[in-house]
């Protein structure tokens, strides 16, 4: 089962990397064409897409995946009711968007863009429902294929706007067209697995809300400590500061595709193992922490040393000042990685009621630090606030008996990557003027040190080989219907 999860995760990561490249190309083109001010306006509106997608990932999707995994016969009714709940939630997000616009007193051009943002929010919510169907079947490739076609269409629309010297509003309107095509493709493939039944079942609602109300608070708190800084920056410093900060945020968050892909594969199986095999459950979350920390810690070292070069190369020299924010935010990503896995553990083990405690305190710390640091340090203060707030949850988890094993695992599996990364840091520091030498040699040094300190064992190598020699991805395999 671990190999099956690893292969499914690898497939998702491949798709996510392609998505990341498309998103990155779109982001770079938007930043270069519309500049810091225009990119800042877009980033403010994208905050609400983050709100609805993060809420969906943390609030609705995990509970749906858990319940459909445990009750396959009733899966069509569960997903149908989940889609109705998602529609109601997207409506509340649209209301939040317009209340925020009123409070911040946004200019007229942002108000115009918000009209089409509202349509996009409903579409994003509907897309999340179809993704849940693919997730529980451990075959997200169908959804990813449809999403890649949407991104390709969006990129085409963007270049058309740039070629015709268009404006933000025109891009926003045109970008909705690929979205509608994407939803059609997603529905077509999803119906082959589970065809939703839209009959309101109050028992299903009771189960979903009983399991998800703590995650509602969690998702709100995560939105606060992940995106409230951009809202505060817009109000205190203006769109220019938001634009400078957003490029650092977007690059740092590119790496989130890995823990999201891993937990998409792990959650349905962990939910089952928690009921049937606790040793397998324990082994699975420990391996999740281990592999994610093996990846993100050296990335944080490398990216923090070359943050200025990365930002100026990708987004242009006008964003060079964003390098300092990136150097700070990339270290905060370590706690984002383990936090995503920790959230999946709590959901799979029916302990999601504890999650709002961790995320709530982190959100409060983040707001306080932003209010203290943004007025004086601008977007650098926002980055520092994130670095201070993100570790709060894992530290708190150590002092609670039921979650102490999870926080202990985070700490234990970070020690060897930190040791190997420290020596890699020394090498990069002394060879940083020879970029290509540092770039190509440093990973070998990291892996070598890991092997010497036994941070990688035979089981890990066997798992890697099973992924590398995975014969093929079955793109159009005929699915087994649960109806």
Image (spheres, grey):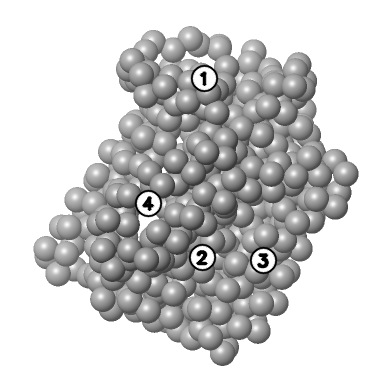
Residue at the farthest left position: 163
Which numbered disc, 4 or 2, marks the residue closer to the eye?
4
**CA distance for labels 1 and 4:** 28 Å
Circle 3: element type: helix
Q: Residues within 10 Å of mark 4 (few under 14, many from 20)?
A: many
Q: How many dots with numbers?
A: 4
Residue at (55, 28) in percent of width and height: 457
Circle 1: element type: helix
Marking on residue 3: 1
**CA distance for labels 4 and 3:** 30 Å
**CA distance for labels 1 and 3:** 35 Å
Q: In the figure, residue 384 lies in which quadrant?
A: bottom right
The reply to whether callout 4 and callout 3 are in contact (CB within 8 Å) is no
Could you say which is closer to the camera, residue 437 or residue 38? 437
Residue at (76, 32) in percent of width and height: 349
Residue at (51, 83) in percent of width and height: 378
Q: Which residue carries the number 3 mark?
A: 389
Give the mark, 2 or 3, whose residue is nearer the N terminus.
Answer: 2
Q: Which residue carries the number 4 mark?
A: 442
The reply to whether callout 2 and callout 1 are in contact (CB within 8 Å) is no
Q: Is residue 221 left or right of residue 44?
A: right
Residue at (80, 43) in percent of width and height: 403
Give the mark, 4 or 3, whose residue is nearer the N terminus.
Answer: 3
Q: Which residue carries the number 2 mark?
A: 329
**CA distance for labels 4 and 2:** 21 Å
Position of the N terminus, as image quadrant, is top right
Give the mark, 2 or 1, whose residue is nearer the N terminus.
Answer: 1
Q: Is residue 89 above or below residue 143?
A: below
Query: Where residue 188 sits in the image (x, y, percent)?
Result: 38, 25
């Amino acid at each position: 089962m671990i190999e099956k999860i690893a292969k499914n995760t690898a497939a998702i990561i491949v798709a996510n990397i392609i998505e990341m490249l498309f998103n990155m190309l779109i982001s770079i083109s938007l930043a270069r064409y519309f500049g810091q001010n225009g990119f800042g306006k877009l980033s403010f509106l994208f905050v609400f897409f983050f709100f609805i997608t993060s809420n969906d990932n943390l609030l609705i999707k995990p509970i749906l995946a858990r319940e459909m995994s445990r009750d396959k016969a009733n899966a069509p009714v569960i997903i149908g009711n989940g889609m109705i709940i998602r529609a109601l939630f997207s409506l509340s997000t649209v209301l939040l968007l317009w209340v925020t616009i009123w409070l911040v007193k946004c200019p007229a051009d942002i108000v115009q863009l918000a009209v089409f943002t509202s349509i996009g929010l409903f579409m994003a919510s509907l897309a999340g429902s179809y993704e849940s169907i693919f997730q529980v079947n451990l075959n997200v490739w169908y959804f990813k294929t449809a999403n890649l076609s949407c991104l390709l269409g969006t990129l085409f629309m963007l270049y058309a706007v740039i070629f015709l010297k268009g404006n933000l509003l025109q891009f926003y309107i045109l970008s909705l067209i690929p979205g509608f095509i994407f939803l059609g493709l997603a529905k077509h493939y999803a119906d082959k697995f589970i065809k939703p039944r839209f009959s309101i079942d109050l028992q299903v609602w009771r189960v979903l809300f009983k399991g998800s109300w703590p995650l509602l608070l969690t998702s709100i708190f995560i939105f606060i400590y992940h995106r409230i800084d951009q809202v505060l920056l817009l109000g205190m410093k203006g769109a220019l500061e938001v634009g400078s900060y957003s490029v650092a945020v977007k690059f740092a968050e590119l790496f989130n595709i890995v823990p999201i892909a891993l937990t998409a594969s792990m959650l349905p199986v962990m939910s089952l193992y928690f009921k049937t095999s606790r040793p397998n459950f324990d082994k699975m979350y420990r391996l999740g922490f281990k592999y994610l920390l093996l990846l993100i810690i050296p990335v944080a070292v490398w990216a923090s040393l070359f943050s200025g070069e990365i930002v100026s190369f990708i987004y242009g020299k006008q964003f060079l000042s964003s390098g300092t924010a990136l150097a700070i935010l990339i270290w905060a990503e370590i706690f984002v990685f383990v936090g995503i896995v920790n959230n999946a553990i709590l959901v799979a083990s029916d302990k999601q009621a504890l999650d709002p405690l961790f995320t709530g305190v982190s959100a409060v710390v983040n707001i306080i630090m932003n209010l203290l640091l943004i007025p004086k340090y601008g977007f650098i203060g926002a980055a520092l606030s994130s670095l201070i707030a993100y570790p709060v949850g894992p530290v708190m988890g150590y002092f609670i008996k039921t979650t102490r094993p999870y926080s202990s695992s985070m700490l234990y599996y970070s020690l060897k990557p930190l040791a190997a990364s420290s020596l890699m840091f020394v090498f990069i520091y002394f060879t940083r003027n020879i970029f290509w030498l540092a770039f190509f040699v440093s990973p070998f040094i990291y892996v070598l040190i890991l092997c010497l300190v036994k941070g990688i064992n035979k089981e890990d190598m066997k798992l890697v080989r099973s992924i590398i020699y995975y014969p093929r991805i079955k793109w159009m395999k005929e699915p087994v219907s649960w109806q």
